[in-house]
Image (cartoon, grey):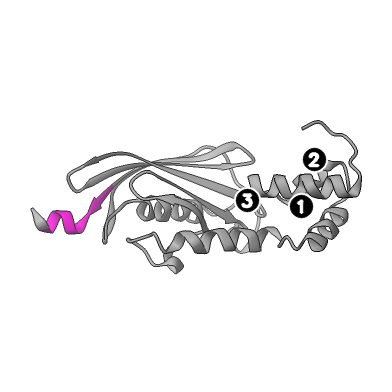
Amino acid sequence: MSRTSFHKKERQNVLVERINEDPFLTDEELSELFSVSVPTIRLDRLELGIPELRERIKNVAEKNYSKVKTLKSKEIVGELVDISLNQSGISILETDERMAFEKTKIIIGHFIYSLAESLAIAVIDAQVALVGVANIKYKTPVYSGSKLIARAEVRRIKGPNYIVWVKISEKQIEVFRGKFILVSLEKIQKT
């Protein structure tokens, strides 16, 4: 959409459409889209009864946690916003200064790895699974305050093994890539 001025009612109608299409748009992204201030977007959301980003993510995530078999919801790092068992999943992690090195404000690697690992485990259709092998690559530093989006794809299932690829991006730039071989313990015990 081009940057054009909207009248309030028109802007609010388009705002509802945009948030329905992508519930993860930030107030800052919406203010840029509509060429208005962030407080104007917040007022529009308030008038329309649209919750803030964190609440929208939480609402979407709660619907997806019940589908997961391998982990409890509190064991999943980030907010699980989409999942199709044995196919794919998406999780979002809002980083903060508690996850970063104090000196550089760069997010500590185990938070990024945990986001990827827990999504890879959550996306498979098994009661109990562990990582057998992980081939990972950190591609660029991530700084405190970044919103990370992890996407998992189950690439292959062979016996008790699940091959899952996870890519994590920030503002559509890939920051982490991982290939996981997960092992379903109940499938091993049956053989």
Give the residue at mark 2: 33
- Mark sitting earlier along the chain (1/3): 1
Look at the numbered disc 1 and give the secondary structure of its residue.
Answer: helix
Q: Which residue does the image show at 56% across and 55% down from the upper left?
A: 93
Give the residue at mark 3: 147
**Residue in front for this viewpoint, 64 or 10:** 10
Residue 7 visible to an observer of this rendering? yes
**Residue in front for this viewpoint, 102 or 78:** 78
90 magenta-colored: no
**Residue in front for this viewpoint, 186 or 130:** 186
Chain part drawn in magenta: 182-189
Can you tell which of label 1 and label 3 is closer to the viewer?
Answer: 1
Residue 154 shown left or right of residue 60 in the figure: left
Q: Residues within 10 Å of mark 1 (few under 14, many from 20)?
A: some
Give the residue at mark 1: 27
Q: Which residue does the image show at 75% across and 45% down from the upper left?
A: 29
